[in-house]
Structures are given as C-alpha cells and as structure tokens.
Image (cartoon, rainbow, N blue to C red):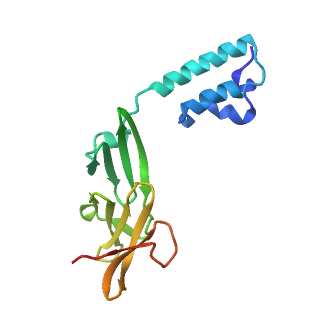
Amino acid sequence: MVHLATILTARKVYLWNWDLISNCESYLKLCFCEVNVITKQSLQVMWLFIALLLIACDKKHTIPEQLQNKQPDLIIDNAEFYLNSCQSLSGVFNDAGKITSRVIVTFPTRLMSYCSEERTQLSYDGTYLTVKLCRTAFAAGGCGLERYRSKDFQHWQEYIGITWVNNEQYEAWRQLGSSSTKADEINKVIP
C-alpha cells in the first residue's frame, strides 16, 4: 500500500501534526497539488485524509481553557479582552459565531520587578485601547507605571514621557519595540 506521507513531498510531511493545522483551505489545496504519484490506493488515502481534515476544520472554535472561567477585563462590541498580569493581553473575538482567540500583544519584561495587579488597568476611549501596567522593582517601594495603546489591536505604542512644543505639553508615544529616542506620535495634554 502506498502511504500518503511518501506521496507528498518531504517538506509537506508536517501535515500529520494536527497542532499545526490552522488554515484548512491551504491544506486542502496542498492535498491536490503536491501529489507526485496517483494510484487507486493513494486516492483512497487522500480522500480519507481530506475527510478527516474537513471534520477537524469544521469544529467550533472555543475560548481557550485558561480564559473560560475568567471574567473579561474589557468588552468592546463582540470582542473580550483579558489582561494576563504584566505579561500579555489576549483577545477572544466572535465574528458571526466563529470564535477565535489570540494573544494580541506581549509586553516587554522588566528584570527584578513584579506586577501590582490592583493598579493594572485596561480601558477603551473609543479610539485607543490602553493598557496601564504597574510594576514595582524588588527592594523599591513605588510603582513604575507603564502605558501601551493601540487603535487596531495590531500596532502598539508605548508611552515615553512628556514633551513640550510651543510652551504646550504633549504626551510622547513611540512604536512598541522601537529603540528610537524620538516620539512617533504626540498628543496634546488637555488639562
């Protein structure tokens, strides 16, 4: 009997790892495009594989187990947001009954510090989703407040301080992960 793994090219053997299946349509195309030798037995195996793949892809997406018993920190329309301490922000999105979840942003780590949960906040003002983290360095008493924001949940900015332009005070923001000392965006502070 000809095995499907030998029919597919060597670089596509990872199909058998069900954990890596994320885009069912591309894998179905792969089943039809990557076959080198077609025999009656290989077609039977391929159709069985396609049936199993369709069943796996058709399953209802659910909320990840670690978020199921937790109350969302913020709800915006059909999206729920969960703040995972000072580590990351996760989102669960309901798009016409199709539920997907993902880590939206992972925050930079600070060595020798811990997160103060009670002072950590998640808010939305209609434009920006803003995360405020309170980290305290070991052997220090105060909270170092960090702020991050995003308009689209993909491109994140971090607050880098106050700047002055024509004797007016502005908040300075730069792209998260940037090492630039210059602000990418400034917003006037309204007293």
Figure quadrant of the N terminus:
top right
191 to 70, vertically: above or below: below
Residue drawn at (66%, 13%), measured in percent from left and top? 44
Camera-side residue: 11 or 184?
184
Q: Is residue 59 left or right of residue 79?
A: right
* Residue at the extreme left of the image, as rendered: 191
Among the 4 quarters of the image, the one containing residue 130: bottom left
Q: Is residue 18 left or right of residue 182?
A: right
160 to 2, vertically: above or below: below
181 to 14, vertically: above or below: below
Residue drawn at (25%, 65%), measured in percent from left and top? 119
* Residue at the extreme top of the image, as rendered: 40
Q: Is residue 42 visible?
A: yes
Q: Is residue 17 visible?
A: no
Measured from the top left, where is residue 53 in percent x and y? 55, 24
Q: Is residue 11 left or right of residue 143?
A: right
* Residue at the extreme front of the image, as rendered: 166
Measured from the top left, where is residue 129 in percent x and y? 33, 58
Residue drawn at (56%, 30%), measured in percent from left and top? 25
Measured from the top left, where is residue 12 in percent x and y? 69, 34
Q: Is residue 125 left or right of residue 37?
A: left
Among the 4 quarters of the image, the one containing residue 98: top left
